[in-house]
Image: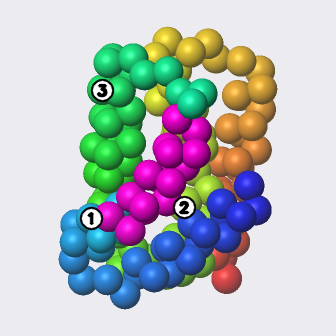
Amino acid sequence: MLTAGVAWGIYSLRGKGGRDAIAATGGNFLRAVPFAALISIITISSTRLDSLGVVYAIISGAITSGLGYVIWYSALPGLKSSSAATIQLSVPVLAATGGILLLGEPISVRYVVASIAVLGGIGLVVIEKQSA
C-alpha cells in the first residue's frame, strides 16, 4: 500500500502540469503494456481465460480506469497539491460504494466504520484549511 500510495502521488504530481489529459493517460497506458505483457507471459501457465472475464477486464481496466485517470488528470491543474492529496484519499470509499451500488455487495460494519474514518479525516483537513 505504501508503494501504491507513493506511486499515485508521483503520478498525480506529474499530471498536475499536463496539458492534454487524454494524451497523457493514453501514453501512460501504452508505457504500462510491456510490464503487463511480461507479467502475463510469466503467469500464463496458471492462467485460465474466460471470454466474459476478458470482456470485464477490458471494460474495468482499459475503459473505466482510463476514463477515471483522464478525469483525474483534467481536474489536477485546478487543485493545489495538498488538496489533490486529500481528495485522492476518498477513492477507496468511492470504490467500495460503487461495489455496493453496482454489484450488490453487502454494507458491512467494517465498510461503514472505515468510510466514516476516511471521510471524517478528509473533513477535518478541509475544515482546518478553511479556518487557517
Q: From the image, tell me which residue sits under label 2.
A: 87
Q: What secondary structure is marked by label 3?
A: helix
Disc 2 residue type (three-letter): Ile
Q: Residues within 10 Å of mark 2 (few under 14, many from 20)?
A: some
Alpha carbons under labels 3 and 2: distance apart: 30 Å
- The reply to whether the C-beta atoms of the residues labelled 3 and 2 are less than 8 Å apart is no
Whether residue 53 is visible here, answered yes or no, is yes
- The reply to whether the C-beta atoms of the residues labelled 1 and 3 are less than 8 Å apart is no
Q: From the image, tell me which residue sits under label 1.
A: 26
> Which sits earlier in the primary sequence, circle 3 or circle 2?
3
> Which sits earlier in the primary sequence, circle 1 or circle 3?
1
- Establish if 102 lies above or below 62: above
Left-right relation of 35 to 114: left
| Residue drawn at (49%, 73%) of the image | 12
Q: In front: 129, or 101?
A: 101
| Residue drawn at (62%, 56%) of the image | 89
Residue 79 falls within the magenta-colored stretch: no
| Residue drawn at (41%, 81%) of the image | 16
> Magenta stretch?
30-44
Alpha carbons under labels 2 and 1: distance apart: 23 Å
Alpha carbons under labels 1 and 3: distance apart: 20 Å
Q: Exactly how many numbered labels are in the figure? A: 3
Q: Quarter holding the N terminus?
A: bottom right
Residue 33 falls within the magenta-colored stretch: yes
